């Protein structure tokens, strides 16, 4: 088996969209299979959703012998406001979780492990034999994970380990308040590299010894960012399983995540590689978030823009590393968001305009070629 994915199969309820089957494990396994990897999924699902989940996996050619079907409900994620950049954290209703011994999982050259709510596959020793001698990609996930950090995942006996985290997960991992501070402590002990996903600004790879390699983000129309990190992880793992090194696999995964964001699909489709290849052939733009974190931003709004919208825009800017609270001694940059208040969705218009402005002001155009 070239790739083993360990992670959740969950129900996702997203405001404004029909219910769908999702979860990091399911989404990443499907994305990896679309890129030609021989994939096996380890996870669990409630009896009510098992047939639906297995039909999706069978259609993509993903082996699911390591998926346990449990009596009880399937864990459900609920996102009430998917457009709120700073508040995408879903509510979670934890369903049935495994209680017995570890399933018999195949040994794999590459293992992608996600943190999950309600169950810790590392402590349960699910992955010890499967990862022995291979490469482990550990996706830290957020506060709902039962695996509380890279040190716990480092007990998996892999030959090489790579940490995947977004900016906030990296800050939590290192107990630092910003990306600027966190990078100095990456990768963690026991890891060869850390891959930091900075959203609209791109991806930063930090290897052992502190060597950095930035990769830009592609400018696409955003339909949904939910699940983009899972697609990124699945395609990155598939590329590494196929023999690519980390610096070659990262732009491939970045382009796939961009195609997912632009597509707004429920699950990774068969044409994901073709759509990603078209996006990957265009230049990307890298913005070093640390430059934004070093500044404070003064925002000009339309006079009639309601307080709720201003508050949401402010949270969105802070999510992007653009702090609006400042003192007289801070270096301040101005952002003119007047006229965005006239848009149907002023919050989305303001964030989109800000990202475009920051790319112009701070961006470095790159030609990272995702395959």
Image: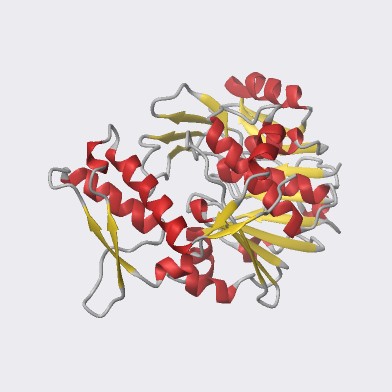
Residue at image location 86% in from the left, 47% down from the top: 107
- Image quadrant where one finds the N terminus: top right
Whether residue 7 can be seen here: no
Give 267 or 293, whichever is nearer the viewer: 293
User: Residue 134 location, x and y as percent?
Assistant: 83, 56
User: Residue 194 location, x and y as percent?
Assistant: 64, 64
Residue 313 lies left or right of residue 183; in this view the side is left
User: Residue 114 location, x and y as percent?
Assistant: 63, 48
Residue 225 lies left or right of residue 342; in this view the side is right
Q: How is the image coloured?
A: secondary structure
- Image quadrant where one finds the C terminus: top right
Number of numbered labels in the structure image: 0
Residue at image location 36% in from the left, 34% down from the top: 80
Whether residue 2 can be seen here: yes
User: Residue 200 location, x and y as percent?
Assistant: 49, 51
Residue at image location 47% in from the left, 69% down from the top: 290
Residue 175 lies left or right of residue 278; in this view the side is left
Q: Is residue 339 above or below residue 271?
A: below
Q: Is residue 254 above or below residue 35?
A: below
Q: Which of the 4 quarters of the picture holds residue 118?
A: top right
Give 340 or 180, whichever is nearer the viewer: 340
Q: Which of the 4 quarters of the picture holds residue 163?
A: bottom right
Residue reaching furthest bottom?
Answer: 329
Q: Is residue 31 above or below residue 131?
A: above
């Amino acid at each position: 088996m070239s790739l083993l994915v360990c992670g959740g199969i969950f129900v996702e309820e997203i405001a404004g969209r029909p219910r769908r089957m999702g979860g990091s494990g399911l989404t990443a396994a499907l994305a990896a299979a679309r890129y030609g990897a021989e994939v096996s999924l380890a996870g669990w699902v409630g009896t009510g959703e098992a047939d639906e989940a297995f039909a999706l996996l069978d259609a993509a050619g993903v082996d699911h012998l390591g998926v346990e079907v449990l009596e009880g409900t399937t864990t459900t994620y609920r996102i009430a406001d998917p457009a709120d950049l700073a508040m995408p954290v879903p509510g979670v209703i934890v369903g049935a979780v495994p209680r017995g011994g570890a399933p018999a999982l195949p040994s794999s050259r590459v293992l992608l492990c996600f943190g999950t709510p309600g169950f810790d596959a590392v402590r349960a020793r699910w992955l010890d034999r499967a990862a022995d001698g291979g490469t482990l990609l550990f996706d830290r996930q957020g506060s709902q994970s039962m695996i509380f950090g890279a040190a716990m995942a480092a007990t998996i006996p892999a030959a090489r380990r790579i940490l995947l985290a977004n900016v906030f997960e990296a800050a939590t991992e290192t107990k630092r308040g910003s990306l600027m501070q966190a990078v100095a402590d990456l990768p963690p002990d026991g890891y060869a590299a850390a891959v930091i996903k900075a959203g609209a600004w791109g991806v930063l790879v930090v290897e052992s010894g502190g060597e950095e390699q930035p990769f830009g983000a592609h400018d696409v129309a955003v339909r949904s960012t939910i699940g983009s990190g899972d697609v990124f992880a699945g395609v990155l793992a598939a590329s590494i399983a196929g023999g690519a090194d980390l610096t070659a696999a990262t732009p491939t995964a970045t382009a796939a995540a961009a195609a997912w964001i632009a597509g707004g699909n429920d699950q990774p489709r068969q044409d994901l590689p073709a759509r990603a290849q078209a996006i990957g052939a265009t230049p990307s733009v890298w913005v070093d978030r640390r430059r934004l974190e070093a500044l404070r931003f003064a925002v000009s709004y339309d006079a009639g823009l309601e307080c709720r919208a201003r508050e949401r825009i402010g949270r969105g800017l802070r999510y992007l590393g653009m702090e609006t609270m400042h003192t007289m001694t801070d270096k301040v940059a101005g952002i003119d968001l007047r006229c965005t208040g006239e848009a149907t969705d002023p919050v989305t218009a303001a964030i989109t305009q800000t990202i475009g402005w920051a790319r112009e002001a701070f961006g470095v155009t790159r030609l990272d070629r995702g395959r």
